[in-house]
Image: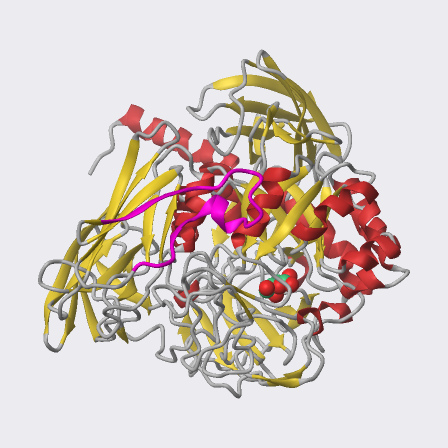
Amino acid sequence: MPIHKPLAAALLLATSLSAAAQSRQETLLTTDWKFSKGDQPNGAKPEFNDAKWQTVRVPHDWAITGPFNGQNDAQVVKIEQNGEKEATLKSGRTGGLPFVGVGWYRRTLAVPTLGKNGQAILLFDGAMSNARVFVNGKEAMFWPYGYNSFSVDITPFLRASGTNTLAVRLENQPESSRWYPGAGLYRNVHLITTKGAHVPVWGTYLTTPEVSTSAAKVKLKTQVVAAGAKGLTLQTNLRDASGRVVASATTPVTGAEVEQDFTVASPRLWSPETPTMYTAESKLLAGSAVQDTYKTPFGIRTFKFEKGKGFSLNGQPRKFKGVCNHHDLGPLGTAVNVAALRHQLVLLKGMGCDAIRTSHNMPAPELMTLCDELGFMVMVESFDEWKAPKVKNGYSQYFDQWVEKDLTNMVHRDRNHPSAIMWSIGNEVPDQSTPEGPAIAKRLQDIVHREDPTRPVTMGMDRYDDDFKYGIAAVLDIPGFNYKPHRYADAITKLPQGFLLGSETASTVSSRGVYKFPVELAKNKQYPDNQSSSYDLEYCPWSQIPDIEFAAQDDLPFTLGEFVWTGFDYLGEPTPYDEKWPSHSSYFGIIDLAGQPKDRYYLYRARWNPSQPTVHLLPHWTWPGREGQVTPVFCYTNGTSAELFVNGKSQGRQTKAGTGATDPQTRYRLEWKDVVYQPGSLKVVAYDAQGKAIGTEEVRTAGKPDHIRLVADHSRLAANGEDLAYVTARVEDAQGNLCPEATNQLHFTVSGAGKFRAIGNGDATNLEPFQQPQMHAFQGQLVAIVQASNAAGAVQVKATAPGLKDGITQLTTSK
Ligand code: GAL
């Protein structure tokens, strides 16, 4: 077909413009990977025949498919930081999954013609672990720490023509972790090529040295690799969230770094409540020819940590309402998925959470971007060990040689994120108890300050007496204490900083929907079924129930807030059942491993989310056999008082105790301790301080299981092959009441524009695989994760079980 001339010219122009502008090409290496578990002596060689290897998509976690087995990484160890005095056999400590050993990944690399000044870089967001990167048979890079991002210039290893072979060997040692670390290329791998002058990886550093409501000063430092080019200029536009240019600068490039200063009038400030983003869009020009383009998303905000005043963001005092999270995504394992991270953050947001601690390692870059966008302040953490080991083959073996490189990469990658609010140089490192500890802390803190003078440094300290005896507590910008609310009042008299952070708090244990009697506060409580009670009164020898931290935070003005251990349950560390297989995932989560809130979610929500009423009752009210027995009832509410009714009969009104109360529980929970169980209705009406009703909740005794009800967290998905819906299946009686003890095995079929991806029920003892479309309900519920395809259309999700009516729900995917 003849092309109309002006159109052809326009097309040509557009093509040549974009060719010039696209001297940079960035490709995510997701497909066409071959994978093999076990070592392969010739795995790096280009001629190696990998046809029989498994074809996988990266991000990929080789161990999450299991099977679970207590022998995987079984360890006879004494966990010193848990106060253990004797070594015992721990089987589920790292999740009972086969992550130990060697794995190989291979694929061909199609690299565009680079020319004489071109460069090809591989950027690994994280590779677990001891990554050896080979290009055309030659080792180009070794990076041991599996959580860090690193890049490698592969230009010298490329062939002049023809295809290139990329091979990556990974090796996880036994006893190298205190939790499930995942295995393999579990984060993205990027191929970045440039043809001449360019901005290198993480090549910009943007700060906002002065901010007021009328104007913000923005400083952008850009690294430039001239690659032989002369007469370069850097042209940068700052755009607001709607794309409008709000400030610009054009600066000649006279060295390896270009500094540009801008003023943004009436800036919209970033905060968890108003996560407003801007973007610095830079063009590197030789004359009028675009050599490279580079985007730096950023936010404008100020924060301060002040002696006697604590923390403020944009001038407003606030305390961190934070959670610590591990990096695994429950049933999906550690393979990063944006939709899964978003799902986690949305649940946390609903609870009123405003901060995340990436315990105890560098997060996926996607998490940082989501925290910018959704509004979370992040404590970006680096290490669980320094020189002194906690586990036999942990980071301590690399510390001397790698710590500076690891910290530098961490800071360079994340220092432009407004969400990044502080850096953590470590968690509970045993070096706290050595005379060298403070000097090491100072050295690491200085490295971080050198790379980013704008954010403070903290760490999680757990050895209170030693922290003062040897002096590490005084070194840190922000002293962070793990599980020490009872020492805060003493600590402040010794701390030059004048404030302190609950860097890790609570570690209360519970199993979703499981209630144990009698109801009592208990340390290290264990039951024959390996579950913990959801009355939220069970904790570890070193930890507390949430209320104790609440009281300390409320009563002591110098506290900066808290990071609860943990937001989500995670794979491994099944305390208090570390020695009791088949427990293999944690009980600490406010939300279970499958993404379902436990009762505690509402205890935190009542405190952290004042804008919405919370009225939550526990336990469930289906107790055949408990008729006539005392069955305590708790209400988690942000009301001040509430009246409880059993079958319409008042059980009295409870009111929260005031600040002076000696028992913190009475300040944060409403408790009816003497309720006698009768089947029927349990109902609560909550009131605010003025006596106005703010909400009600009713739980009814369930009859026998009748049907499955499916509830999707959202029903419209992006048709991008990655988006996820979390579909909760509830076993209900004929009236729609949850059958809270149901254990039916549910089977899923997903058809249309989506597929079944994974399943979980939140039971820390469950050995059923996450990848089969069936599982037993745990306490009446489970969650199936459905993945959108690349096609737009309808997705039917169906759950069946013998004796139950089917559950059906429909999702749609769109482009
Ligand atoms: C802390 C530690 C965490 C986790 C937690 C469990 O001491 O920092 O990683 O082990 O205990 O309570």
In-image side of 422 versus 666 (left or right): right
At a point 46% along the width and 41% down the height, the residue shown is 607
At a point 62% along the width and 84% down the height, the residue shown is 75
What quarter of the picture does the N terminus occupy?
A: top left
Q: Is residue 769 above or below residue 181?
A: below
At a point 49% along the width and 59% down the height, the residue shown is 110
Q: Is residue 710 above or below residue 176?
A: above
Q: Is residue 165 above or below residue 536?
A: below
Query: In terms of depth relative to the viewer, which is nearer, 768 or 411?
Result: 768
Q: Position of residue 585 (x, y in %)?
A: 48, 71
In-image side of 417 versus 310 (left or right): left
User: Does any portion of residue 563 appear in the rendered image?
Assistant: no
Residue 103 placement: quadrant: bottom right
In-image side of 430 versus 239 (left or right): right
Q: Position of residue 494 (x, y in %)?
A: 83, 44
Q: Which residues are magenta?
A: 650-675
